[in-house]
Image (cartoon, helix red, strand yellow):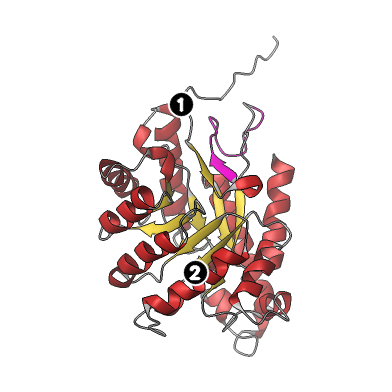
């Protein structure tokens, strides 16, 4: 008896969200099949890879990252070099220097960096906060204004501060709003509903549903992303049809496998290679679970994941 395969494409689809301007603009999302299921239906917009840079420059970065940016003396130089990294589709500027528990840079100082980066690159831009809710509320609202006209993703609005960030980014300054929740499908949906109720169009919302590094409770990440994609595609749940963007670099480079020195753990091998391994394996895993874009920082990781995406598409 002949085998007649059935198509696994769905009637519903993930929203296609456009980021950036001009010839370098890109779209994330838009698919109506499971991740990389190109044998069921064409996936017009392949997953995208971003490069994370920090307003603190190259402070504390791995040797391979510093080597790539050798000769860069300003944030504009770093941003341009990040945009030119082989395999990169966009740049993510993280304003970690604003953290009150760190450098506690003023909002004004951070906006000077945002302006410098905005003026330096023509690729799509993601602007991320410092993870301090009180500071981010002001920080990302001002960043939305400084980046006006760039169609950037402002990452991220949380349940505690979504009103101010959502209104500024999604309404006042025509940016894309990143809705951040903590590995929970119900919280992700609730935040999408709240931001939509502000008047932000679904086509202007992306989700950061949270992640962990592989080996660190990662099964919760997989199950959450699987359930989100299943609800969006098989149940046509419009409040979960926003594409997913996942900042991997922060997680992968802050676990013991990436941080322990070779002196402390000689049996683990070269420290930087371990960090790259954690970043690549985490990025590959979230993409296979349903993420539409990942944010990395090591040139080797960016090149590896970009190659993986091309070969699977």
User: Residue placed at 48% from the left, 35% from the top?
Assistant: 14
Q: Position of residue 30 (x, y in %)?
A: 53, 35
Q: Main secondary structure of the magenta part?
A: loop
User: Residue placed at 64% from the left, 90% from the top?
Assistant: 263
* Residue projecting furthest to the bottom: 263
Vertical comparison of 86 with 139: above or below: above
* Residue projecting furthest to the top: 1
**Looking at the image, can residue 208 be seen?**
no
Q: Which mark is residue 114?
A: 2
Q: In the visual, does 144 lie left or right of 118?
A: left
The foreground one among 104 and 242 is: 104
Label 2 or label 1, whichever lies nearer to me, is 2
SS at badge 1: loop
Q: Position of residue 42 (x, y in %)?
A: 64, 29
**Looking at the image, can residue 143 be seen?**
yes
Q: Position of residue 90 (x, y in %)?
A: 60, 56
Residue 160 sits inside the magenta stretch: no
Label located before the other in sequence (2 or 1): 1
Q: Which mark is residue 12?
A: 1
Vertical comparison of 74 with 293: above or below: below
Residue 35 sits inside the magenta stretch: yes
How many other residues sit within 10 Å of disc 2, few (<14), some (14-19) or many (≥20)? many
Q: Position of residue 281 (x, y in %)?
A: 61, 59
Quarter of the image with the C terminus is top right
The foreground one among 284 and 108 is: 108
Q: In the visual, does 110 lie left or right of 272?
A: left
Task: Give the magenta part as a residue range.
Answer: 26-39
Q: Which mark is residue 159?
A: none
């Amino acid at each position: 008896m002949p085998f007649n395969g059935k198509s696994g494409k769905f009637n519903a689809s993930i929203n296609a969200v456009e980021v950036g301007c001009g010839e370098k603009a890109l779209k994330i999302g838009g698919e109506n099949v499971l991740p990389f299921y190109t044998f069921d239906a064409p996936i017009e917009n392949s997953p995208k890879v971003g490069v994370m840079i920090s307003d603190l420059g190259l402070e504390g970065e791995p040797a391979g990252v510093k080597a790539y940016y050798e000769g860069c003396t300003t944030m504009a130089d770093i941003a341009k070099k990040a945009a030119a990294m082989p395999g990169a589709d966009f740049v993510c500027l993280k304003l970690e220097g604003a953290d009150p528990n760190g450098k506690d840079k003023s909002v004004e100082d951070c906006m000077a960096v945002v302006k410098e980066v905005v003026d330096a690159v023509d690729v799509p831009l993601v602007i991320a906060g410092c993870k301090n809710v009180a500071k981010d509320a002001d920080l990302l609202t001002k960043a939305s204004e400084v980046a006006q006209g760039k169609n950037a993703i402002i990452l991220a609005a949380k349940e505690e501060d979504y009103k101010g960030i959502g209104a500024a980014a999604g309404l006042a300054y025509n940016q894309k709003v990143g809705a951040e929740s903590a590995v929970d499908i119900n919280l992700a949906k609730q935040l999408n509903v709240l931001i939509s109720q502000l008047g932000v169009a679904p086509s202007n919302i992306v989700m950061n549903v949270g992640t962990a590094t592989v080996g660190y409770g990662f099964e919760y990440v997989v199950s959450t992303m699987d359930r989100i994609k299943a609800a969006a595609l098989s149940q046509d749940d419009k409040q979960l049809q926003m594409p997913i963007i996942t900042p991997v670099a922060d997680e992968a480079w802050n676990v013991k496998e990436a941080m322990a020195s070779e002196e402390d753990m000689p049996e683990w091998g070269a420290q930087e290679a371990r960090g790259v391994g954690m970043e690549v394996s985490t990025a590959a895993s979230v993409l296979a679970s349903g993420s539409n874009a990942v944010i990395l920082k090591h040139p080797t990781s960016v090149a590896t994941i970009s190659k993986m995406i091309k070969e699977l598409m």
